[in-house]
Image (cartoon, rainbow, N blue to C red):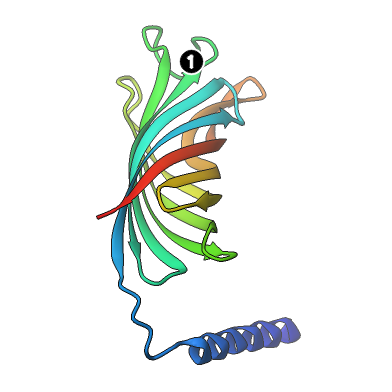
């Protein structure tokens, strides 16, 4: 255990010194904001859902050529396979509003990226009023005006059916296509 801790400390120290030495004091990168509007379609990994459709708006603050901070808000609708115990008989689908903050790191000449987001998923379904934490790592490709990404989302306390019983922990894979522009 001590050896693992030492290795981790050495890796962190090496990474820090390399990034500190790699900084150019004359770097005149202009930090700026970007706005992206996107459409998403997802494949739910749990029953009783068939499909997830959504839209979002993402505000990005580029802190360097390779790193950005993000704030995302959207609206998603989960289409339910059949009416069940999760919602009352008059509800056909399950809607929620994701609100997330994140960190984006560009790789390979600032086109491909990895991103991690965390936030809240707020139920917008009339007969279900619970909210939950949402975690969503993603990978993607971004050009000047387009952004295409694939993400995994996990919503901790949203209802699913597992082994014919109601449980919590909804997961999905989402494809997002967005238009991005500078502010």
Residue 170 visible in this rendered orientation of the protein: no
| Residue 12 at x, y percent in the picture | 59, 84
42 left or right of 182?
A: right
| Residue 30 at x, y percent in the picture | 30, 73
128 left or right of 67?
A: left
Q: Is residue 44 above or below residue 13?
A: above
* Location of residue 129 (image quadrant): top left
What residue is rendered at 48% in x and 19% in y? Answer: 79
51 and 120: which is toward the camera: 51
| Residue 31 at x, y percent in the picture | 31, 70
Q: For numbered disc 1, what is the local secondary structure?
A: loop
136 and 164: which is toward the camera: 136
What residue is rendered at 24% in x and 55% in y? Answer: 183
| Residue 67 at x, y percent in the picture | 44, 67
What residue is rendered at 28% in x and 60% in y? Answer: 33
Q: Is residue 79 above or below residue 118?
A: above
Quadrant the N terminus occupies: bottom right
What residue is rendered at 52% in x and 42% in y? Answer: 153
The extreme front residue here reads 144
> In the rendered image, which residue does mark 1 sit on?
85
The extreme left residue here reads 183
Residue 112 visible in this rendered orientation of the protein: yes
- Number of other residues with Cα within 10 Å of mark 1, as a class: few under 14, some 14 to 19, many 20 or more: few
């Amino acid at each position: 255990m001590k050896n693992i801790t030492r290795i981790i400390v050495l890796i962190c120290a090496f990474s820090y010194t390399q990034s500190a030495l790699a900084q150019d004091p004359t770097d005149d990168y202009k930090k700026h904001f970007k706005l992206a509007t996107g459409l998403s379609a997802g494949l739910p990994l749990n029953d009783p859902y068939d499909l997830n459709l959504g839209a979002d708006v993402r505000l990005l603050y580029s802190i360097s050529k390779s790193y950005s901070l993000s704030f995302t808000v959207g609206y998603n609708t989960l289409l339910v396979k059949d009416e069940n115990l999760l919602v009352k008989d008059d509800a056909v689908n399950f809607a929620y509003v994701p609100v997330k903050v994140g960190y984006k790191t560009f790789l390979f000449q600032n086109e491909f990226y990895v991103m991690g987001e965390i936030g809240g998923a707020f139920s917008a379904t009339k007969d279900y009023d619970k909210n939950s934490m949402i975690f969503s790592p993603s990978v993607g490709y971004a050009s000047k005006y387009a952004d295409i990404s694939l993400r995994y989302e996990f919503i901790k306390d949203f209802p699913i059916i597992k082994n014919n019983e109601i449980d919590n922990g909804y997961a999905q894979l989402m494809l997002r296509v967005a238009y991005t522009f500078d502010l």
